[in-house]
Amino acid sequence: MESANTDITEIPWDYYNQTKDALKKAREAIKSLPVKERTILEASLNENVELYVSTNPNKVGRVVAYIDAVTAGKEIEDIEFDPPVLDLFYELTKEYRVQISLQESRTDSSAAAISLYKKY
């Protein structure tokens, strides 16, 4: 592969797709190995590669989350908001962070964020 992408706003589709293809080929290659070796290599692939490219809804890969974040950021940039709307948004998110912090300090749980989110 070529040098890494230095522009964090550009999605490295080539790297992502090449990695997914290499992972698929590696999984095919280890299928014929003895169970013990296959188990070790499969665990290594899951820990070192799948961690980044997984599209499993229960365990989204780091690169997939990055791609989603960049895509969402670009979509948000395209939306033009009126200044009063932006002010309300910033005020609401500030209050939300304060309430989450207060509720988490009382419950010591990230479930506080979920319960407060459902309230809005």
Image (tube, helix red, strand yellow):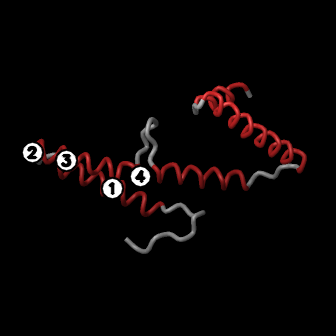
Residue 111, x across and y down, in percent: 58, 29
Q: Element under label 3?
A: helix
Q: Are marks 3 and 1 in contact (CB under 8 Å)?
A: no
Residue 52 locus on image (x, y percent): 41, 52
Real-space Cα separation, disc 3 to disc 4, in angstroms: 19 Å
| For the residues bearing labels 2 and 1, Cβ distance under 8 angstroms | no
Earlier in the chain: of badge 3 and badge 4, it is 3
x and y, in percent, of residue 54 in the image: 40, 46
Residue at x 34% of width, y 53% of height? 49
Identity, as a three-letter code, of the amino acid under mark 3: Ile
100 to 70, vertically: above or below? above
Q: Which residue is mark 1?
A: 21
Q: Marks 3 and 2, Cα distance to the nearest angstrom?
A: 10 Å
Residue type marked 2: Pro
**Labels 4 and 2: the sequence-earlier one:** 2
Q: In the picture, which quadrant includes the C terminus?
A: top right
Q: Determine the CA span between mark 3 and mark 1.
A: 20 Å
- Residue at point 42% right, 63% down? 15
Residues at marks 1 and 4, CA–CA distance in whole angstroms: 13 Å
Q: Please state if 30 lies on the left or on the right of 1 as rendered.
A: left
Compare residues 41 and 2 and report the one nearer the observer: 41
Nearer the camera: disc 1 or disc 4: 4
Q: Residues within 10 Å of mark 1 (few under 14, many from 20)?
A: few
Residue linked to disc 2: 34
Residue on which disc 3 sits: 40
Q: Quadrant of residue 105?
A: top right
Marks 3, 4: nearer the viewer: 3
**Amino acid of disc 1:** Asp
